[in-house]
Image: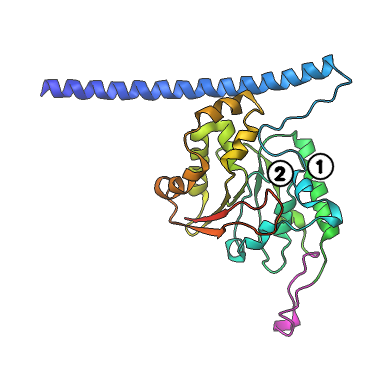
Amino acid sequence: MAERNEKKRKRIENTQKQQIKKQDGEVKKEERDGNSEEMAKSGQETQAKSNPNKKFKKVFPYGNYKSYYGYRIGKGPEREEDPRIRVLKKEWFEGKDCLDIGCNSGVVTIQIALIEEAFWYLRKFVKMEFAEKKNTNNTNVKAVQDVNESEQCTTKSSNKGADNGSSHQSSCERNLSDIVSFRQENFVRSRPHDKHLSVTKWIHLNWGDDGLISAFAKIWRLLRPGGVLVLEPQPWSSYERNRTVSETTRSNYRDIKYRPDFFREMLLDKIGFRRVEVVTSNLSGTRTGFNRPIFAYYK
């Protein structure tokens, strides 16, 4: 009996030591990540000072470059509708609290909010940290202005003749600030989604397998029963193209074990989503970058 108790005590001690060692390793990794980011930033500043006449390409380690959607779908009144909006179902958003993680300049987020047939209540949207808050706010304001310029202000009149002869409120009469709000935040590390398009790659490259699993688990906890995670994972070839934006991404790229093809199994078997629906295998006729499969995972 005494021998069994001694063995049990040693097992517990070993487990505790392993947990402490793991926690220490995570802390040191965070410190290394922070140091590498500071070194990269410092290196860019030093190069700029030593070569004031030479133009350097700005690197965005946490997401696509500023005004990415301006390149994809154009700007201002000539901007096209993002083709992915056509496959998003109204019932996923109508009357729901929604979270768009990694929204870039917010153009697509605002386009969703302005679809008048849905009357969506889109309250909270999170943007990954990759720009100063001042620049982020200016970008969002410009995005709102661009969308307003290009949207046709039409009033839905399908309820004409109903009680008091009232009709639905038009998109122009709604105040965007009451529908959409933006926050600059690191979702992986914050404590406190539904929409999660094209951002998993950046979480994966910056925080590795553990960071991605943590983000998926956090999304699952935040979703109410019946809630939906709309996910557009990027292919491994896209990881390869962006792996060198920082020392952190370069290191994590080499260590990644769970590639995008494994996400389905991870979300259903390990995270706990009930089922998955392939919204579209591809968006035929759309430009490169918007033809990736989109999945809806139901809690």
What numbered label is drawn on residue 138?
A: 1
Q: Which of 265 and 196 is in front in this view?
A: 265
Stretch of the chain drawn in magenta: 155-173
Q: In x, y percent, where is residue 190?
A: 57, 37
Which residue does the image show at 62% across and 61% down from the upper left? 88
Q: Which x, y percent locates residue 189?
A: 56, 34
Say the numbered circle drawn on residue 53. Answer: none
Residue sticking out furthest to the right: 53
What residue type is disc 2 on? Asn
Residue under numbered circle 2:
104
Q: Identify which residue is drawn at 62% across, 39% down.
A: 238
In the image, residue 287 above or below residue 254: below
Can I make out residue 111 in this image?
A: yes
Q: Is residue 206 left or right of residue 51?
A: left
On the image, the x and y values in percent for residue 157 come to 75, 78
Majority secondary structure of magenta residues: loop
- Quick one: label 1, few (<14), some, or many (20+) residues within 10 Å? few
Q: Is residue 256 above or below residue 284?
A: above
Frontmost residue, 181 versus 135: 135
Q: Nearer the viewer, mark 1 or mark 2?
A: 2
Q: What element carries label 1?
A: helix
- The amino acid pointed to by label 1 is Asn
Which quadrant, please, contains the N terminus? top left
